[in-house]
Amino acid sequence: MRHLSATLSRVKPSPTVAMSGRALELQAEGRDVIGLAAGEPDFDTPPHVRAAGVAAIEAGKTRYTAVDGIPELKRAIVEKFRRENELDYAVSQISVGTGGKQVLYNALMATLDPGDEVVIPAPYWVSYPDMVRLAGAEPVIVEAPAEAGFKITPQQLRAAITDRTKWLMFNSPSNPTGAAYSESEIRALTDVLLEFPDVWILSDDIYEHLTYDGFRFTTPAQVEPRLKDRTLVVNGVSKAYAMTGWRIGYAAGPEPLIAAMRKIQSQSTSNPCSISQWAAVEALNGPQDFLDGWRAAFRRRRDLVVARLNAVDGIDCATPEGAFYVYPSIAGLIGRRTPAGKVIATDEDFAMALLEEGGVAVVFGAAFGLSPAFRVSYACSDEMLEDACARIGRFCAGLG
Ligand SMILES: Cc1ncc(COP(=O)(O)O)c(C=O)c1O
């Protein structure tokens, strides 16, 4: 269509949405499909947070607010960074948006021009490269394979940086692999970044609270304070507080960047939902102890899925440090044929056939920039996971 912008042709629709769309269609036809594709916790928003949302409605806190967040929420965020990340920010260095997604989008829109480059380790969260392209810039993909723990090395980072590099996108724990960088692994990267004063760090810490086996989460600006002035730390309440539908994300960083992000938000969505902001104040300031139970459940499910998948011939699954994803390789299944006669040439073929013939929805690795693999979200009940892994086992055993 002539009316559509040229920029749009550089961007593809989210493949995760396409997979879950097909899964919904099959379910609507009455087919029994287990969904392991969704990127959200299966827990409910904690009762005290829900109550804060209801109280906000009852108190009439239902009007426009300041564009990038109410002062109460910004103060709660400042306090969160001090308490959990040893990072000191002023309220003027905080931006609140409609999900971490909008905050990331604002930051990229506020900083990128055509010709600029953004270094993105792969596998990456699906939205990063397309957001960069929407802003007119170029993603520079650096592959971090399973053998490297899905983490890039300092040598790779140095090699990827050019005089056009504006950002390193850093996401730990990661969607889609669950891999998390230790403090010393972060230090190895921040040492490189110290050599390149024009490269900024966009640290997406949204899975911060979901790490297991005693892993200690750290974030680049905390590990290397000399980089704090060129780091934007992005976080949100979606994953840690099971608040995906409330749409609150936030960032902390240099004041001029925060002001630029505010300008963009002021001309697009304005403030994030007022009710959700008050609920987020309670999420950040209220009790955090429920998280231990969630973490224990996620760890148990991770171990279950990793063990079951590794028992399947042709699948190889690493045990990640965090988030609620695993990212098994299917290198051993490429070239095989399904009972319905489909040849599995790519991980997209695998995911489609597993959905159509095996009744399990997952997301194929090509969506995240590293193949052949697939992403499993284990944010669902143990029973569903057992059933889904048994189905995956039967499907793979049936391949010719
Ligand atoms: C790595 C990563 N960053 C950011 C987001 C954005 O989350 P939200 O917009 O719900 O805050 C997600 C959600 O899936 C994610 O996986």
Image: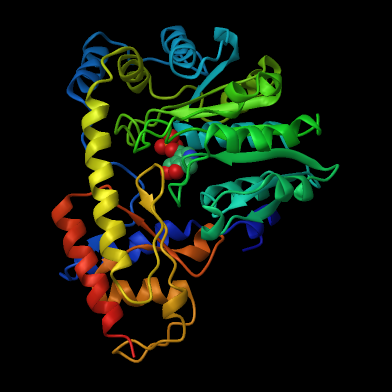
Question: Where does residue 373 sit, x and y in percent of width and height?
Answer: 46, 66
Residue 353 vs 135, above or below: the answer is below
- The single residue placed furthest to the right in the displayed view is 163
Residue 178 in view in this figure: yes
In front of the other: 325 or 45? 325
**In the picture, residue 317 is in which quadrant?**
bottom left
Question: Where does residue 165 sit, x and y in percent of width and height?
Answer: 78, 42
Question: Where does residue 264 sit, x and y in percent of width and height?
Answer: 62, 28
**In the picture, residue 57 is in which quadrant?**
top left
Looking at the figure, which quarter contains the N terminus?
bottom right
Going 60% across and 46% down the picture, which residue do you hit? 131
Total numbered circles:
0
Question: Where does residue 272 sit, x and y in percent of width and height?
Answer: 44, 24
Going 52% across and 15% down the picture, which residue do you hit? 86
Quadrant containing ligand 1 reads top left
Residue 281 vs 207, above or below: the answer is above
